Every structure is written in C-alpha cells, then in structure tokens.
Amino acid sequence: MNQEHQHCLASIRSHYPQFSVTEKKIADYILENPTEIIHSTINGVAEDLGVADSTVFRFCKRIGFKGYQAMKIALASEIVTGLKDIHERIDEGDTAQTVATKVFRSNIKTIEDTLMVMDEKKLMKAVDIMSQARSIEFFGSGGSGVIALDAYHKFIRTGLRVHAASDSHIQLMTASQMTSEDCAVFISHSGSTKDILQVMDIVKESGAKTICITNFARSPLSQGVDTSLFTVSEETDYRSEALSSRIAQLTLIDALYVNLMMRREKEGQDALRKMRKAISVKRL
C-alpha cells in the first residue's frame, strides 16, 4: 500500500492488539492527540511519553511508515484534507439532498477506512476456515443479528451448510451442538455484547473454529477467536458508529462470500445454479 494513501489512525487501530505495552502507550497518545502530533517533533513526542526517540521511530515502522516524518505527513493529510469533513454536521437548514449526500459520504468513508485496515492474511485464513468447515454458523445480536441473517442469505448460495438464528436461546443451543469440524462467525460492533460472548465461550468448548467481524481490536471477542476482521467507523451527530459500521460489515461479508465462491469453483457454481432454479418459480 502506498504510504501517501495509508490512513495512520486506521492502521494504528488495526495493529493495536499486537502492540507491546510501550507501543500501546504511543498509540494511545497519537489517537488522543492527532492534531498535536502534526506540530510535534519526534523528540517532543518521545519526551512527553518518557521513551527514546528510537522507540517512537520503530513504532512508525511498525504501522507501515518509513519513519516519523512519513507518519506525520499521512496523519496531516488524514486530518486536513477532509476525513473529518465527511462527518459534517447536519444543519437545520440542510435540504434532503444535502443530508443524503452527507450520509452517502459517511458510508463511503467507512468502507474505504475498513479497506485500509484489512489484513489479507486474516481474510484468507477466514476463507480457509470456512471452506473446510462441515457447517458455518453465523451469530449476531440486535443490529448485528440482522447482518448475520444477511450473511446466511448470501452463504446459502455456496452449497455449504450454513445457519443463523436471531434468538439468543437458540444461539446457545446451536453452539452446544457444534463440533471441531464446524465454524462460527461472530458479528458484533462492540465485541463485548454479553449474549455473543456467552455463545463464543460455548463454541470454543466444542473445538469449532471461530471468526469475528468487529470494530474494536481490544474487545473480548476479537481476542478470543481464531481470526478477526475489523471494521472502521466513527460516530457522527446523526447516527452512532454502530450504525455506520453496518455498511462495512456487509461489505466484509461480501468479500468473504466471493472469495469462498472462487475457492469452491464448480461446487459453488452448481449450488448457485440449483438455488436460482429453485427460486425461479417465484417469478412471473
């Protein structure tokens, strides 16, 4: 990825779970003071944090930049050129078209930011797990439960055994019947929803492989599964980040689906053909 196109803050969030204690200290400082960083030298940051200049330099390399200056340039571009402007305030005098434009721009930003932090190795690991599973169970609660049902609607086309239940009791019952041959996909914006964490614990007892799609790298869910895929979304004055992340969650699921269909080749095409034939009777 070209550094001039890399999002500094998104990269920090995606790498956060793998950071050392010192790296997390630097990450927190940058996330909390992005504007100040632009006007600071590497010596100033190091002094504020009580670490060596070389430690800050290595952190910049860790998140994909050649050095501190390269990170500053990316961070300045991220802030100054309008990533925040995408989340413009909704003003009382805005027309319906203006409001729609702001919503569309916010959704576009969410998808672009999520693409920036996508880890290809983790994506392919998730595809590997799903392609080898006897069955795939999608779990989500509340708004994420709707996303889980959408995933079921897509993946039923693969020819694999897939399932999604919206009721929390049925989710627990389903989890209890899984085996080491199965795969569970958890969808949770916060990654700390009690119902989903309870299901995850039961699934892990079964030995099934686990995947999650979440917005928070430090969440109990992301740290408890075999592989995690992250969305990036920010709260605006007209909707929460959980609503914004929905677009990124759907897009990640689409990416998994298409990769899995390409992996399955003939089996996937045969399943898709059968499904289309079956639902053709519903059309006039």
Image (cartoon, rainbow, N blue to C red):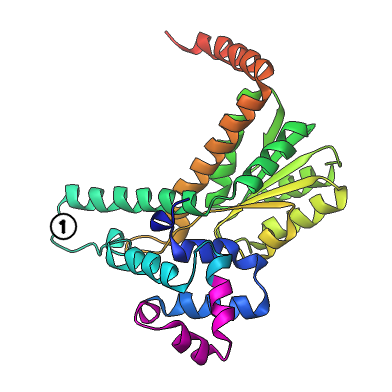
Task: Using the image as rendered, state which of residue 132 and residue 121 is in the foreground.
Answer: 121
Q: Quadrant of residue 149?
A: top right
Name the chief secondary structure element in magenta: helix
Residue 218 in view, yes or no: no
Q: Mark 1 falls on what kind of element?
A: loop
Q: Is residue 83 left or right of residue 33?
A: left
Q: Residue at x 45, y 78 (%)?
A: 32
Q: Residue at x 26, y 53 (%)?
A: 102
Image coordinates of residue 264 in percent, x first then y, are 68, 23
Q: Label 1: which residue?
A: 94
Q: Residue at x 48, y 61 (%)?
A: 10
Q: How many marks?
A: 1
Image coordinates of residue 161 in percent, x first then y, are 73, 28
* Above-or-below relation of 70 to 131: below
Task: Using the image as rendered, state which of residue 170 and residue 133 is in the foreground.
Answer: 133
* Above-or-below relation of 82 to 178: below
Image coordinates of residue 260 in percent, x first then y, are 64, 30
Q: Quadrant of residue 58?
A: bottom right
Q: Is residue 36 left or right of residue 177?
A: left
Magenta residues, as a range? 35-59
